[in-house]
Amino acid sequence: MEGFDAELWAIELALGETVKRRERLQEQGVKTVAVFSNSQATIRRTAQREPGPGHRLARRIHWRGWALVAHGIATEIHWVPGHSSITGNEEADRHANLARDASRSMAIHRPYTSASNRARQIADGRSAAKAKWEANKCGKHFRYRLKGKTGTKRPVLMTSMKSLATRFHRLKCGHASTGVYLKRFGHQEDDKCWWCSGGRGSTAAQTLENLFRHCSRWRAQQKTLWKAVGKATGWKAGRCRHVQISELISIEQCDQAVMDFLAAADIGKFPPKWTTVWRKR
Ligand SMILES: [Zn+2]
């Protein structure tokens, strides 16, 4: 039983005892019965009969209240501060502790005794499942980080500026803003290169191949890139000429060269403002 249910149950029990003794109370001229509780939530609950936690007990408390009214006895439920040396409250606390200690060995486990108990069981189960999942899947010190070498695989990328790394990963998975990509998703009328428009190669589609090797706007940067790639991998010029750009990006040794190239050239960025290539909205 939940603490909330126990408080309601206690109020219901007190009123039940009063109902049993109603004849005698009437004879003695008792007009009002007062029950004291230190739980404000419970008192609020007794004021209403809508479905919710402790619904069954709240309804019974209402019945008892009306039964007493029928005998000319009014019922009041009052709040008292708990654990502040109020005699009745301390006495109730002592009895509650005695009952708890006595029943510990013979506790009856019934699943879902009430709506609030069910809510707590669900919450407990959920946090236990979360802890189990985290223990299995996440690192010990950083709970938000999944286990594995994800964070240490490519040190150059992990330590670079976020905007650069973003562009790198977009190039890697084919979602960078190149002419071909923008045309494919309807952002642009054609897939022509906007960097070298009017120049040589401007009629070619703006692919990764084009940007990394042929685009005349980034000639100097391309030269530096391929030199750095040759140095990092030990490849001859012929190998450099024939390697696929997607393969180049996937090779860890070339990370630094590619990142330097991206930092120097605006490849993979949206077209600058001076172009009028956007389709009307
Ligand atoms: Zn170009």
Image (spheres, rainbow, N blue to C red):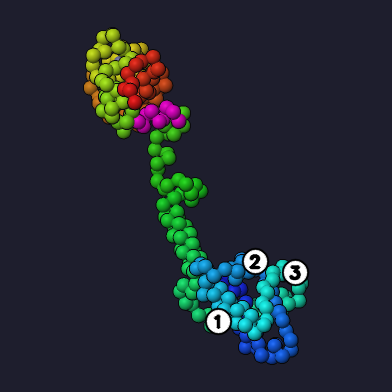
Which mark is nearer the camera, 2 or 1? 2
Q: Which residue is mark 2?
A: 40
User: In this picture, which residue range is highlighted in magenta?
Assistant: 162-170
Hey, which quadrant is residue 266 in on the image?
top left
Measuring 51% from the left and 48% from the top, which residue is drawn there? 141
Which three-letter amino acid code belongs to the residue tagged 3? Answer: Ser
Hey, which quadrant is residue 240 in on the image?
top left
Which mark is nearer the camera, 2 or 3? 2
For the residue labelled by badge 3, is the local secondary structure a helix, a strand or a loop? loop
The reply to whether callout 2 and callout 1 are in contact (CB within 8 Å) is no
In screen coordinates, is 244 left or right of 12?
Answer: left
Main SS, magenta residues:
helix
Q: Tell me where residue 172 appears, x and y as whole percent.
A: 32, 31
Hey, which quadrant is residue 38 in on the image?
bottom right
In screen coordinates, is 132 left or right of 53?
Answer: left
Q: Which residue is mark 3?
A: 84
Mark-to-mark CA distance, 3 and 1:
30 Å
Mark-to-mark CA distance, 2 and 1:
31 Å
Which three-letter amino acid code belongs to the residue tagged 1? Answer: Ser
Q: Which residue is mark 1?
A: 105
Q: Quick one: label 2, few (<14), some, or many (20+) residues within 10 Å?
A: few
Q: Earlier in the sequence, mark 2 or mark 1?
A: 2
Q: Tell me where residue 158 appears, x and y as whole percent.
A: 44, 34
